[in-house]
Amino acid sequence: MRLPAQLFFDGAWRNSASGRRTTLINPATEEPFGEVAAADVADVNAAVESAQRVWESGWRDVAPGKREAILHAVARKLREHLEEIAQLETLHIGKPISDARDEASLGARVFEYYAGAVTKFCGQTIPVGRGGFDFTLRQPMGVVAAIVPWNFPFPIACWKAAPALAAGNCVVLKPASLSPLTAIKLGELAHAAGLPPGVLQVLPGSGSAIGDALVTHPLVRKVSFTGSTGIGRHIMELAARDLKRISLELGGKSPNIVFADADWQRAAETSPMSVFANTGQDCCARSRVFVERSVCEPFVDRFIAATKMLLVGDPLKPETQLGPLVSAAQRATVEEFLADARQRGSRFACGGGRPRTKGYYLEPTVLLDVRKDDRCWREEIFGPVVCIAPFDDEAQMIRDVNASPYGLSGSLWTNDLRRALRIAKAVESGVLSVNSHSSVHVEAPFGGFKQSGIGRDLGMAAMDGYTELKNVYVAE
Ligand code: NAP
Ligand code: MG
């Protein structure tokens, strides 16, 4: 398989202006396997300026039906290359291949959805008081910068690029340093499918080297970011200078709430993968489990039994459920949390160690007796670690759930409809699922309350975020 190893912009492969390259390491083997060009500030400026020219000279005025057809062609092209995309994803981040295949397919589905949205996303006519004719337009912004993380590199690149393009913008996409391959592949395939050169620019490169230049470039009208809360806050500060539009999808510490009246057995069996999937490197990971005390003990027993059944191993094997963490640094961060838990006297019901000598693996770990002011309870770990705690009182439990500065996702297990509705309203999060752990639906808005972010990806809400709203009044 040929590695997509260069910048891809203006419809062509390029080396970076500086000639700098980043070495990629396979997290399952710890072996370096290739190098990718790393963009510099000069490349950022060239890519943004060229995208702006392409936008002004044609892309913004492409007829909706034509834009729809191009995005459908991109989706078809992605579908022809799903296996290649999945293999690249597994190679650079160690994601289990079966998940990588599902996510490659999700990316294509996102392009299909937004291809359809082009001709269905519309303004209003408004009967203003003084008469005449009043209507709204949803207009593209210009150049959008999309900055994406390494945990779901391909689908997140698609769910930013597709609605931004559907709305008539050009996009400069910056993948994470650890995961440039599938983003570059997206640029190449989109171009091969008929997206005009310059409309989707892909700039692999280090965030610390080029992030600020991209975010502050005066021609970038909007920054759409997914990543850590710290970098999100930094981007928001920079964007404040010229009131740039932003959307931020940040961290989480999501609750999984289980009532005794629920099918708690099913909850216990399905909950391990709600936190350990992607080796816990998931902003929606249900990392705080609240279980009504009367069923907590048997729930924990089942949860542990299900955890011990998970297949940790070679991410290229189709049966593998958990691969390695993405990097040595990420594993070291998670192990610091575990050291803190040991020191604070938490009980390790299972896991806590390294299951293999090669690769950045860590066992899925269940912590009990974690205090509410411990780091493991409060902070996002971004690794395969869960805290389970009993609760007695619904109102107190909701206060504990909402005590987190995050508010991204969550699950609720109950068969009592009134309770489900009451708690769905009370939990401070952008996404909640009842008797399920699913957070992401292409057709529905996804994003966070509080320090989990601002703005929404996916659904028609994302189209709002990639347009400016204009009101036009015509006198009679
Ligand atoms: P990160 O360090 O915030 O990186 C995210 C992206 O930002 C990467 O492309 C990174 O590039 C770039 N970046 C770094 N410094 C930058 C700067 N000064 N200006 C602009 N961009 C910069 O996060 P991560 O370590 O990749 O991902 C883990 C975090 O992301 C977790 O906290 C997780 O919760 C969050 N996350 C949230 C969601 C969500 O939807 N809410 C989804 C996935 C992940 P480099 O890689 O080159 O540093
Ligand atoms: Mg980082």
Image (tube, helix red, strand yellow):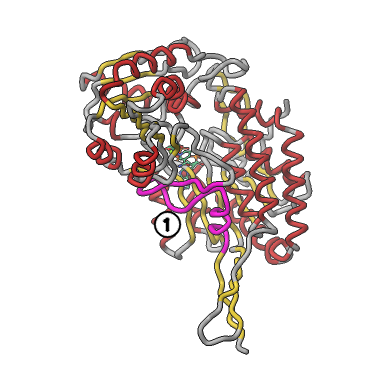
Query: What is the x, y in percent for residue 218?
Result: 53, 63
Does the magenta portion include 463?
yes
From the Cβ of disc 1, is ligand 1 less than 8 Å away? Answer: yes
What amino acid is labelled 1 in the image? Leu
Query: Horizontal placement of 364 versus 359: left or right?
Result: left
**The residue stretch that appears in magenta:** 444-467
Q: Residues within 10 Å of mark 1 (few under 14, many from 20)?
A: some
Residue found 56% across the figure and 72% down from its top: 470
Residue found 67% across the figure and 42% down from its top: 15
Q: Is residue 130 visible?
A: yes
Q: Is residue 392 above or below residue 164?
A: above
188 and 314: which one is in front?
A: 314
Residue at image mark 1: 238
4 and 20: which one is in front?
A: 4
Residue found 72% across the figure and 42% down from its top: 75
Image quadrant assignment for residue 19: top right
438 and 471: which one is in front?
A: 438
Q: Is residue 382 above or below residue 137?
A: above
Does the magenta portion include 365?
no
Query: What is the x, y in percent for residue 380?
Result: 36, 34
Q: Is residue 18 above or below residue 79?
A: below
Image quadrant assignment for residue 74: top right
Query: What is the x, y in percent for residue 27?
Result: 53, 22
SS at mark 1 in the image? helix
Query: Horizontal placement of 420 versus 225: left or right?
Result: left
